Image (cartoon, rainbow, N blue to C red):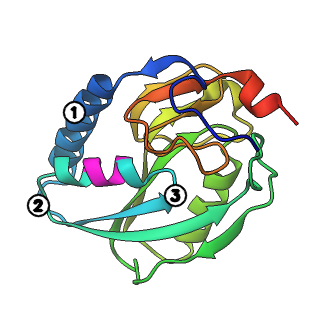
Amino acid sequence: MRSPDLVADVAGVLVSEEQIRARVAELGAQISADYAGRELTLVSVLKGSLPFMADLMRAITIPVSIDLMEVSSYGGTATESSGLVRILKDLSSSIDGRDVMIVEDIIDTGLTLNYLIRYLRGKNPRSLHICTLLDKPARRLVDIPIDYLGFTIPDQFVIGYGLDYGEHYRNLPFIGVLKPEVYAAP
C-alpha cells in the first residue's frame, strides 16, 4: 500500500469538525436527561469509536463508567464486512444489572452490531441501548434499533474521526469521503 496523503486522498468533507462537536454535545445532553439519576456504562467498540466515545463521555453530565471491546468483521484494508465476527477483546467488568450503551462509530450492514447486541444481552444488563455517530442505512442487512444517532450518511467509504482505511486517516478531525482510487488500487 502506498503512503497515505491525509489531504489529497480525501474527496470531500461529509461531516465537518464543527458539526460533529455540536451533535456530540446534543447527544450528551439527551443521554444525560434520559438517564438522569442513574449511572451508565458506555461500551466502546474499538478502534473506530474511540474519538467519539471520548468526546461523548465528556458531554454526558451523569456518572458514567466505560469499558472497551474489540470485535472484527473486516480484514486488514478490506472495505467490505466479512460477516464473520470475532471478539478480540472482551469486557473487563461485569455488566449484570447495569444500564449499558454501546457506542459505535458507524453502522452499515448491522451484522457486527447485531452479533454484539445478542452477546451483551447474554450478560444480563438492566438495559442495552445503541449510540452511533454514523448510520449508513443503504447497506443494512439486519434491523438495528438505534437509540441515539449522530448523522445518517450515504453509501460512501468514509474516513476520519476514528474511521480508517488500512489503519490510516483515523486522526482526521472530520468525516471525509475517501477517493475510490485509494482503496481500489491493487
Report which residue position mark 3 lands on: 47
**Picture coordinates of residue 41, whole percent (x, y):** 31, 67
Q: Disc 1 to disc 3, how far (Cα)?
A: 23 Å
Which mark, by number, is residue 37? 2
Residue sitting at 53 percent across and 43 percent down?
Answer: 163
**Picture coordinates of residue 33, whole percent (x, y):** 15, 45
Query: What element does badge 2 sit on?
Result: loop
Instruction: State the residue in front, 18 or 111.
Output: 18
Q: What kind of residue is marked 1?
A: Glu
Image quadrant of residue 155? top right
Q: What kind of residue is marked 2?
A: Gly
Q: Dot 1: within a 10 Å radius of its alpha carbon, few (fewer than 14), some, or many (20 or more) residues?
A: some
**Picture coordinates of residue 184, whole percent (x, y):** 82, 29
Say which label, 1 or 3, has the lower sequence index.
1
Instruction: State the residue in front, 160 or 123.
Output: 160
Residue sitting at 67 percent across and 48 percent down?
Answer: 166
Q: What kind of residue is marked 3?
A: Lys
Residue sitting at 46 percent across and 29 percent down?
Answer: 175
Instruction: State the residue in front, 46 or 36.
Output: 46
Give the number of callouts. 3
Residue sitting at 47 percent across and 76 percent down?
Answer: 124
Foreground mark, 2 or 3, reads 3
Report which residue position mark 1 lands on: 26
Query: What element does badge 3 sit on?
Result: loop
Vertical comparison of 52 with 175: above or below: below
Quadrant assignment for the C terminus? top right
Q: In the image, which residues are magenta?
A: 52-56
Circles 1, 3 touching at the beta carbon (< 8 Å): no
Query: What element does badge 1 sit on?
Result: helix
Q: Disc 1 to disc 2, how far (Cα)?
A: 19 Å
